[in-house]
Amino acid sequence: MADGKAAQAFDIAIIGGGLVGASLALRLTQVLPSKRIGLFEKSDLSAILRATGSSPSFDQRSTALSLSSEAILDTLGIGPVLWAEAAPILAVHVSEQGRWGATRMQAREQGLSHFGHVVPNALIGQGLWQKLAEAPQIRLLSPVSVESLQARETGWQIGLQDGAHFDTRLLVLADGGRSGLLQRLGIAVESQSYGQRAWISNVETRQGTAGWAYERFTKDGAMALLPLSDFEGRPRSALVWTLPEGQDPAPSDLSENQLIQALDERLGLRGGGIARVGSFSSYPLSRSLAREQVRQGLVVLGNAAHALHPIAGQGFNLSLRDVEGLSRFLQSHPDAFRLPELQAYESERQRDQLLTVSSTDALLGFFHSNAGTAARQLRQAGLIGLELVPGIKKQIAEFGMGQGR
């Protein structure tokens, strides 16, 4: 060792303490209570936890959780904290700007109380990290910078920038879609740009959405308006607005009055129209899939393993299903380490991942603004068909809820 000290040892080490890595660490304490778990995170989670305990802001970002994700978070013991402040999705309305087709799906028609919840990200993180702090078998190393990863005969060795070293039997990479560690390990990522950028903001609507989630396809790209809990007594929704990369002017360049006019025009006055627009964040959109999600003693998870277009809201939901799948696999194979064993886990998850990615891309292509007249008529007929044929609507609803896979 460079520092002359013996490496400390874990049974399972997770690099990345965000929502996916933290969920996995907490789930593993339930299914493998005797295992020693290390969670490595470059950000200062204690500082983030203190910040998330402060008063919420109008601009806090949120995630739409499917029913399957809700069940996983309930299992982790943080559900009661989330649902008290979350907004339920009671119905979904899908339409295309300037066209006559539309479809509406209501949870009660499917025998459900709701399709999912829209939950502030900070609230999910706060619940997870508070539970982690109470778990004695987890050692949280934060903030730390991982300098090296070395494959060993019995696992991996993690080297930190400060010279500390840690051995682990199983290493999980959950450090996000721009993981520099994948590149260092020579794990290729198959990536395709959509040529679009997602613009994310919270908006105040004049009448509220009464639990409706709106998906709107425009000539520029897809939009979504998702219900949020009221803020200071006023109705609030989460906006996802996809536009061509390099759009001029960008939403952040417009005045609030110009934004309200543009959104009302594109959304068709859903929620009674927009009364206020919060600050924007944005990121380029691409589909990516790691060509190797497992190696000897190694698993790639979350956005490091796959990223997809937000049109169907499936990114974090898919990652949570991976978390549950890996946890259950390790519960029945507690000493899984060798490549053939881990490839069995990869095979179990492959169908769900490929179905979710391909279905998301198919949905995006189906509503592509440059489609010809025949394709436009077909998708309009398809939307009306969804309205008239309950069985089809049920299949689409089950896909969105993380069921039927």
Image (tube, rainbow, N blue to C red):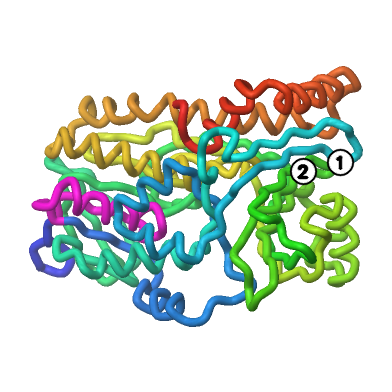
* Image position of 170 with respect to 361: above or below: below
Q: Identify the residue shown where x is 36% and y is 65%.
A: 127
For residue 394, which quarter of the picture?
A: top right
Q: Identify the residue shown where x is 39% and y is 52%.
A: 20
Residue 19 counted in the magenta span: yes
The residue stretch that appears in magenta: 10-36
Earlier in the chain: of badge 2 and badge 1, it is: 1
* Image quarter of the N terminus: bottom left
* Image position of 217 with respect to 24: above or below: above
Residue 84 lies, in percent from the top left, at: 46, 65
Please state which amino acid type lies under the numbered disc 1: Gln
Residue denoted by label 2? 216
Residue denoted by label 1? 97
Q: Residues within 10 Å of mark 2 (few under 14, many from 20)?
A: many
What is the CA distance from the residue labelled 2 to the residue labelled 1?
A: 7 Å
Secondary structure under tag 2 reads strand
Of residue 11 and residue 356, the one placed in the foreground of this image is 356
Residues at discs 2 and 1 in contact (Cβ within 8 Å)? yes
Viewed as shown, does residue 111 lie left or right of 127? right
Of residue 103 and residue 344, the one placed in the foreground of this image is 103
Please state which amino acid type lies under the numbered disc 2: Arg
Residue 42 lies, in percent from the top left, at: 38, 66
Q: Identify the residue shown where x is 46% and y is 40%.
A: 318
